[in-house]
Image (cartoon, rainbow, N blue to C red):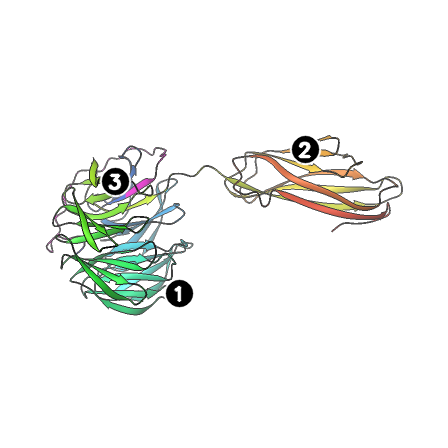
Amino acid sequence: MISLAAGGALALTGVAALPGSAQAATSPTAYVANFYGDSLSVVDTSTNTVTQSITVGNSPVGVAVGPSGAHAYVTNFDEGTVSVVDTDSNTVGATVPVGSNPLSVAVTPSGAFAYVTNSGGTTVSVIDTATDAVTATVPVGNGPNGVAITPSGATAYVSNSDAATVSVIDTATNTVTSTVPVGSSPAGVAVSPSGAFAYVTNSGGNTVSVINTATDTVSSTIAVGSGPNGVAFDASGTRAYVADRGSDDVKVIDTATAAVTATVPVGDGPARVAVAPSGTAVYATNVSDGTVSAIDTGTNQVTTTIGGFDGPYGLAFAGAPSPARADIDVRLTAQPHLNILVPYLSYTLTAHNTGPQAVGSATLTAKLPPGTKATNLAAGCTASGTTVTCAYGGIADSASVSKTFRVPLSLLTLGPVKVTGQRTASAPSDPGSANDTASVTCHAVSVVLVTCP
């Protein structure tokens, strides 16, 4: 197992992960898999401290977080499973059986699927994230190790450690469309933000193969340190970072020149690297000394060494919690009630919560035509001139609350009668204004002949 073993043997040492308790993080959260601790450490990157330890399966290795940040996927090497962690509650919500010795995992940009390399065999398991079940198994080369997916989501690149190749998977059909020869014992894979290149670390050859994704051929080979493993790009794609386990450092590659421009000493046995969402720091997991190094991308120097891990290996970020939001869809309907004595139009003003959070309170108004007034107001509604204001209490996600009122018709009412409803206030914040208004127009020929849509 090349990616876990330096020189072909496991040599993981470390200290116990901090149990801690969940704390609200204001910066992106880092999730670190503890191979020896059978746990996932939660790191608050604003303070660079371990705030919680989540029990997962046996010997967790790889970690990936979906694009929404709602779930982290953890490969359990000795158990043949993937733990699905709810990042809101930091609890395991599902455990998915996959193949033998699952190592790495990558989630598609849509968040719909997670691709898992089964290093003990020759397959990649595809997990449907909606059902947390394997929906496809893709044959690849011997000893699949790293996996990365293009920004378009159309292609997955899988390094085959025992075959010295990279399998190119069409994610629409889950079939291998190309096999690319690379260096000895390929391990980590990363695709550039543009999708133009895939970088593959050859841990047995001390090089990085650069694959042109347009042709699926190696366009250049970059010499790095000893035993390169993890690799990651910055957001601009101008730099790539490589964790060199054998030389205990991180190499910085200028992607324009395909050359190493800096060497950053870190801890003992760096395995994986990941660039923080801010772009100001790169984190490296040091398997053999139980630490994680935080590197300043501006100075290429370690600014913080975080302890409290037990064989830290895989690493992934989830964004800072977004503000609570609840989108209100305003709906308005009208119904004529016609008789000679008291003709009127009845209106129903509805606040429908499309989520994602529950609505705590909301205020909707209805603007009536000039010269009209509202009567028979529902509880929580008031009228002032031609404006009706309705207060709504709590509304659960996907639920609706309606308020009603009437507009009497006079003998002189002729032509269109238009009423417009609008959201004027709500809590928590409403993420979109496109559905904040609704109008309905009835047409009156006389007090006994009125039509409404």
Can residue 7 be seen here? The reply is: yes
Circle 2 sits on which residue?
389
Q: Label 2 is placed on what type of residue? A: Thr
Mark whose residue sits in front, 3 or 1: 3
Circle 3 sits on which residue?
298
Residue 288 sits inside the magenta stretch: no
The spot of residue 318 in percent (x, y) is 35, 43
Q: Residue at x 71, y 46 (%)?
A: 440
SS under mark 2 = strand
Q: Residues within 10 Å of mark 1 (few under 14, many from 20)?
A: few
In the image, 91 versus 129, the foreground residue is 129
Mark 2 or mark 3: whose residue is earlier in sequence: 3
Q: Residue at x 35, y 40 (%)?
A: 90
Region rendered in magenta: 5-31
Circle 1 sits on which residue?
172
Residue 267, quarter of the rendered image: top left
Mark 2 vs 3: CB contact within 8 A? no
In the image, 92 versus 406, the foreground residue is 406
SS under mark 1 = loop
In the image, taking residue 222 as reference, residue 357 lies left or right, namely right
Q: Label 1 is placed on what type of residue? A: Ala
Instruction: Give the quadrant of the N terminus.
Output: bottom left
Q: Label 3 is placed on what type of residue? A: Gly
